[in-house]
Amino acid sequence: MASSSPSRQQNTDHNAFSGISRPSKKRRLCGSSKLYDVFINHRGPDVKETLAKDLYKSLHELQHSVFLDSEELELGDVFPSNIETAIRSSSVHIAIFSRGYADSVWCLAEFALMLETDAKIIPVFYDVAPWELRFIGKGVYAEAFSNYEEKGRYLDKLEGWKESLQSVSDITGYECSKHTNNQDLCKSIVKAVGKEVQSRKPLRVAEHPVALNELVQDLERYCGRKEREGENVNIIGIFGMGGVGKTTLARELFNNKRSEYDGACFLADVREAYARNELQSLQSKLLQDLGIEGNVKFQSINEGITHLEHRLQSAVFRCFLIVLDDVDDMEQLHALLIKDKLNLVIVTTRDEGLLISAGINVRYNLKGMNTHNGSELFCQYAFRQPYPKSGYKDLVDAFVKICGGLPLSLKVFGRHVFGRAEDFWRLELDKLSRVLPPDVMQSLKISFDSLDNEEKQIFMDIACFFNDRSKSFAIKIWKISGWSGEHALQKLKDKCLVEEIDNFNRITGMVLRMHDHLRDLGRQMAEKLKPLRLWRPGDLQSLESDGFQKTLEKTKDRCFHSMLDRSMDAQITYFLGNTNDCSQESSSLLLLELELNDKEHPCIPPWIPLQDLRCLKIFYGRLRRLWQNNVQAPYQLKELLISKTFLEEFPDLSGMSNQLESVQLNAELLSKPIHGCCLLKPWKPRSIVLNSGSTLFTNGKLACNDTGLRATGFMSSNFPNLLLFHIFKSGGRLALNKLSSIDLAMLLELNISECQEAEELCLQDLYGLEKIRVDGCAKLNCLEIN
């Protein structure tokens, strides 16, 4: 049986039960606070001992809560509040229209109130034909209404009651004459009621709905803004990373809004159904839950789409609430998305790009919880209260920090430590900071599995190497490797796997950042998948030069590695990959980072290939020189950073001057001259950072003496592409007595703070200058900027 709700009576000017005095018999009926699934509206003398009781018994056996008035109320009695509560709380109303139905003012009053609610009404025509309700003046109820009019009773109610009966005549219901007996009729009704009750029960949202109302209100405000901007808010996309609470928010919205619509359907786990080739089943469920059509099977998705469009077009002036949960493919939206200005459709997904492709302009980005709400949710699971136990505050804060506002992790971790001693908390805190729990891992891995191979490789690169690092630098490395970094990065952003953060630095630009759990996922996957990535000290206990060279020769895939050479006690991070042809036997090293741990070494090991190196970074060490000789020199080098490293000799960079783009030096140099006071060819770096005892490469010569460095020929140097000029605490090592006549047309930032020897600064044509710092320049007596 397919049935639909009648047009609702709204803005009623009268109460259907007003004007009726208190009953002569008082009864307590289950308590006014009880909620019911089903309310049976009937005329007692006609059907109470037959159909009504049969329905009551059968529904109770199915664990449904049913209201059946056991006594006939007399005319003149007050309509009991518990009956009104039962009507308003029930999700399904059964109205049994018998021949004496209209003789009872209570039946009519109850039915009028039933129409004011959003409950499903199932009419049963018991010895009465539907047309007799449509034409009150000609059917079995004509006499009853005539009697009311003749006696002048309920004159203000009669027209409303007539309209109520007439409206229900258009609803497809159950006719007694079409069933062999009462048992057959009862069985059919019970089956329909069971389905309807189940579909109308509120969805279970969350065990502890912390800050859920705040989220709903924030979403409503967002939709309000979009509506004022002229956007269509009938289709709302909610996107975010796995475990952030998209389904929870959608369930709460569904429960809050469903009463405003003629039908509602929540299609959960669309992605999983699609993977099982069950989209046709979801199409059938959609029609059934909306009350448009019963159980119908489709042979294909296209057949289902055609049928959905046809049936929905016939449902004129009816509005529906539909939730499509966990969508990850355009075909799913094509098969299930019903666009109509009367409907509200909510789509949840991990992929914002999918929403954009579908033309959904109202897209709500669901972020993680703030620290306060995260702490409350964690404590609800860890302590069964919204705040920490005494002495656990710091541990709770540590767990909340690890979770990064992700509700799924807060719930999993909270349950994990519930009822455990403090020592267990500390041990698990250390473990969980390194290894994701299976529940969290499984949820996040869904997004990882949806990536293609190149996107997976770039995701793991970011997790292992580029998290919180410059986007432009990462793109540069991927481009050299032959990967479409920009395109893959956009896909990762669409799927909420990585963000671009503006660090308000015009030099480094945007920074890549991912949630700590996603970072851990990427690193765990990097340990399992080829090509191998190693990024932690101790990943390899030992490394022989020959073995390393064999690894280079055998590696054909593009990959990042990080190995520990115990002989150097150095952390080596490098990129292996053929820049042109993956079938080549030799591999290229593009990125090298050395942490020398304050150990003294002669140079970078000669067995590390530097011929294609693009970026070299060295930290915390003592080196006699960077590389052994010119044969090993990285002539393709674009970026050089030497930080907190003691160098005995600085190399000749003249052969790579055309390639270098950025030089950052924070090196302590010994008193030996810098490599022959070499004359460098002109080059145009985009940034130079000078630290104590550092070098500045110019068109002139570099000289070094016992007191430090002095840049000769600096006054006539040109740096037309320089964006940053930064000198730290030079003391007496770098004497800048005068800066003038320098071409710094593109300069954005000038920082000479605490250059105690600087006396005069005269710069011209700095049209782009945004920031200048001269604090600590005690001798500076002239600052002229044109």
Image (cartoon, grey):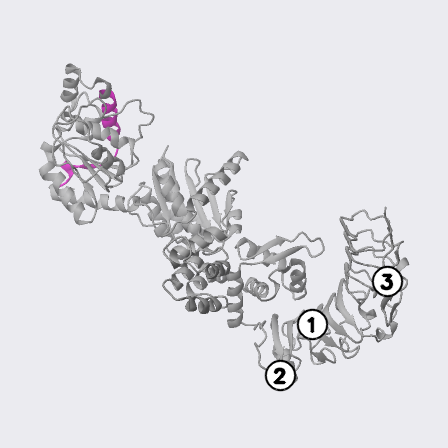
Give amino acid for label 1.
Tyr
Residue 579: quarter of image: bottom right
Q: Which residue is mark 2?
A: 547
Region rendered in magenta: 158-180
Task: Select label 3 or label 2 by which is in front.
Answer: 3
Residue 558: quarter of image: bottom right
Numbered tag placed on residue 735 in the rendering: 3
Dot 2 surroundings within 10 Å: few (below 14), some, or many (20 or more)? few
Numbered tag placed on residue 436 in the rendering: none
Task: Select label 2 or label 1 by which is in front.
Answer: 1
Q: Residue furthest front?
A: 390
Residue positioned 79% across, 79% down in the render: 629
Residue positioned 76% across, 59% down in the render: 687
Disc 3 element: loop
Q: Is residue 575 above or below residue 448?
A: below
Q: Is residue 64 left or right of residue 475?
A: left
Q: Is residue 288 left or right of residue 618?
A: left
- Answer with mark 2 or mark 1, whichever residue precedes in sequence: 2
Give amino acid for label 2.
Gly
- Answer with mark 3 or mark 1, whichever residue precedes in sequence: 1
Dot 3 surroundings within 10 Å: few (below 14), some, or many (20 or more)? some
Q: Is residue 27 magenta?
A: no
Residue 383 point in image, percent of width and height: 38, 58
Task: Select label 3 or label 1 by which is in front.
Answer: 3
Give amino acid for label 3.
Ala
Q: Which residue is mark 1?
A: 620
Instruction: Please tell me which residue lies in front, 594 or 11.
Output: 594
